[in-house]
Image: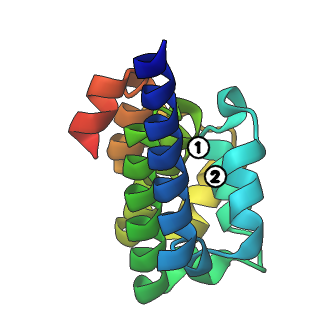
Amino acid sequence: MADNEASLVKNHRVVHTVLGSMSTVGYWKKLPTEAQEFLLETQLESLDIHRFAEFWSSPMRIEYASRPSLTRWARDASLSMAWDYLRIGKMREARALMLNGIFMLECMTSRIESIAESCRKNVTMRSLPELQEFSHAFNYAKAPAVMEELL
């Protein structure tokens, strides 16, 4: 029993340390304030290309998906936090952040305005060849091992 309690305490410390380092390093500060709520509180099933395009093409946030330096920061912060959440077993958060990072990667090669316009036309991910990375991650990165490979 003592070993089990010691293990629980150790795991709690690891989780606390990882989550604390995310905020102290300033990962969330590299994203707009409402991004944390969007990524961590939206139902994972509804986080598809349409939701990402709608969120990031908003006039209040579009610069994060259209200015190369901000897009890179958002991508790097999202993927770093995804890895950290994956390490502590928070799969839902890790997947949301990984998808966000990959969406930002797509925004580095395709204009957010074009992505958003395609989404407004109810185009599916499969019919958007320029979003292959996001489509692949969305469809296949559901298990920890696959997510780890992508990150």
Q: CA distance from mark 2 to mark 1?
A: 5 Å
Numbered mark located on residue 52 in the image: 2
Q: Amino acid at mark 1?
A: Ile
| Viewer-proximal residue among 100 and 16 | 16
| Quarter assignment of residue 105 | bottom left
Give how far across and how far down residue 5 sits, in percent: 51, 24
Can residue 129 be spotted in the picture?
no
Q: Residue furthest top?
A: 1
Residue at position x 38%, y 21% in the image: 143
Task: Determine the residue positioned at 45% across, 30% down.
Answer: 6
Crowding near pointer 2: few (<14 within 10 Å), some, many (20+)? many
Q: Residue at x 46, y 36 (%)?
A: 11
The answer to which of 111 and 16 lies nearer the viewer is 16
Which of the labelled discs sits on residue 86, or is there none?
none
Res. 49 mark: 1
**Secondary structure of residue under mark 1:** helix
Where residue 96 sits, quadrant-wise, is top right
Q: Residues within 10 Å of mark 1 (few under 14, many from 20)?
A: many
Image quadrant of residue 88?
top left
Give how far across and how far down residue 142 sits, in percent. Answer: 43, 23
Which residue is nearer to you in this view: 101 or 133?
Answer: 101
Instruction: Tell me which amino acid carries mark 2.
Output: Phe
Q: Position of residue 47 (x, y in %)?
A: 65, 38
Q: Is residue 88 above or below residue 63?
A: above
Q: Is residue 44 left or right of residue 91?
A: right
Mark 2 and mark 1 in contact? Answer it, CB < 8 Å: yes
Element type at marker 2?
helix
Between 108 and 122, the residue placed more toward the observer is 108
Q: Residue at x 55, y 52 (%)?
A: 16
Query: x%, y% of residue 76?
Result: 38, 68
Give the vertical position of 30 relative to 97 (above or below): below
Q: Is residue 142 above or below residue 108?
A: above
